Amino acid sequence: MDFYHHKESSENFTYRSSPIKSLFDKYIEFKLFNKSKQIRALSRNLSKQKYNLFRNIHFSRLLTAYELLKKFKPNVIIIGEDGIAADFILISAAKKLHIPVIVLPYGLADSSYLISKGVEEKYKAGELLTTNDPSVQLVKKLYPKWVKETPYGEAIYLPPEFILALESLKIKIPYPWCLQGGIADIILLESDVMYQRYLSEGIKNEKMKLTGSIYCDVMNDVIVNDNAIKQAFEQFQRIDNHQLKILVCVPPSDHDGWKDKCDYQSVADFIVALLNLFNQYSNVEVVYSFHPRMKESDRKEILSLGIKDQPNFPLYEIPKCDILLACGSSLARWALAARKVVINFDLYKFGTNDFPHVPAHIQINEIEELNALIQLFSKNPNRFKELLLNSKNELNKMGTINGQATSSIFNAIKEQIYHSKNVKILHRSLS
């Protein structure tokens, strides 16, 4: 099986206009903006220069995508997400060429993240476009799916000209505010929890297939090769009753936009507070894993404290800990699947709690709260086990750890390729 990794840059595409293309563009513009008197009036507030620029860029990228796909002739395209943050141009081209597109999700975010963080950032910067703007009214009139109710009114996340240019080229994103809201053929789901999450976002049932996650297989390899870890997993208990093991996932810095909501001068300052807390306990073992997107200044300051960055991918370390301490990390669900207690320190006080219904997922935003939890769990292994057992039903929905997910995913990919070949044959016979 051959693999091709596609990474787009500004050098990947060029645009060459032609008289026929220009004439066709004018026809599309006429069809789009002359549907009614109201639409004509609203369209006068649109920057036609920006609209044409975006349309040319989208069209150029579409041509480049077609050339790439025809040259490489892939049997399948595998992506991490198919929504507005994905390469939706390539996905659109693949769909028109009847090449199957499969999503192997890696993140946890949903539309609430765009509202709680992205929209608020735009609002604070004075860049949020709402239906107070006639051009946003135009988008709402023509393509209401792009408009979302927010605390600041009905808003769009991308420029109106960008959106209208996409739609004019029939590049479809059915649910623009959903991270998996695109037109991939199928999403290979990690767990029951993610099935319910995507369902609540409007994703159709027939687009989803439960396979499990490769991440669970990674953790399974660690669990089955260590008797103490395996017993802790099977019995919903700590690995060692005499030593509480904590994995700290050091977050990237969001201080550029959110320092006013944080009690610490920097991420490094937060880690100093953690270090001072942990040093009070002789029966607590702490491992640190640095986020790859950390600021270099934070990294240097933290390393100067004598803290070492665990070089392994965090999934290899999660089974080895009792507690995952993170700050809004999607790793939380994998730690819960591995039957660990997760303490989510809401460093920037976003208030986003992914699993409020799971007792083993504890949301805090004060160092004193963390100290109380460390005291409780370090002194009382039975309280730790009780918390996990009370969460058992929910933990089992986070992902099945049995070493079979990779095989299940591979079989699902082969099945989709086979189905796509039959669709191509049918399409050719009808054309």
Image (cartoon, rainbow, N blue to C red):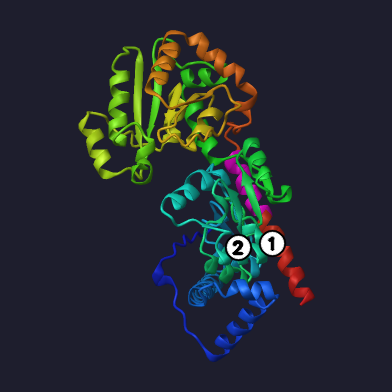
- The residue segment tinted magenta is 405-415
Magenta stretch: dominant secondary structure: helix
**Image quadrant for the N terminus?**
bottom right
Q: Amino acid at mark 2?
A: Asn
Q: Is residue 159 left or right of residue 33?
A: left
Q: Quadrant of residue 181?
A: bottom right
Magenta includes 414? yes
Residue 280 seen anywhere in this rendered image of the structure:
yes
Q: Nearer the viewer, residue 48 or 312?
A: 48
Q: Position of residue 423 (x, y in %)?
A: 73, 65
Kindly identify which residue carries mark 2. 75
Vertical position of residue 410 compared to residue 99: above or below: above
> Marks 1 and 2: CB-CB under 8 Å?
yes
Magenta includes 388? no
Q: Position of residue 336 (x, y in %)?
A: 54, 28
Q: Quadrant of residue 285?
A: top left
* x 50%, y 75%: residue: 60
Q: Amino acid at mark 1?
A: Ser
* x 59%, y 60%: residue: 76
Instruction: Categorize mark 1 by other alpha carbons within 10 Å: few (<14), some (14-19), many (20+).
Output: some
Q: Is residue 7 left or right of residue 426?
A: left
Instruction: Categorize mark 2 by other alpha carbons within 10 Å: few (<14), some (14-19), many (20+).
Output: some
Marker disc for residue 420 = 1
Q: Quadrant of residue 323?
A: top left
Q: Position of residue 395 (x, y in %)?
A: 60, 27
Callout 2: helix, strand or loop?
loop
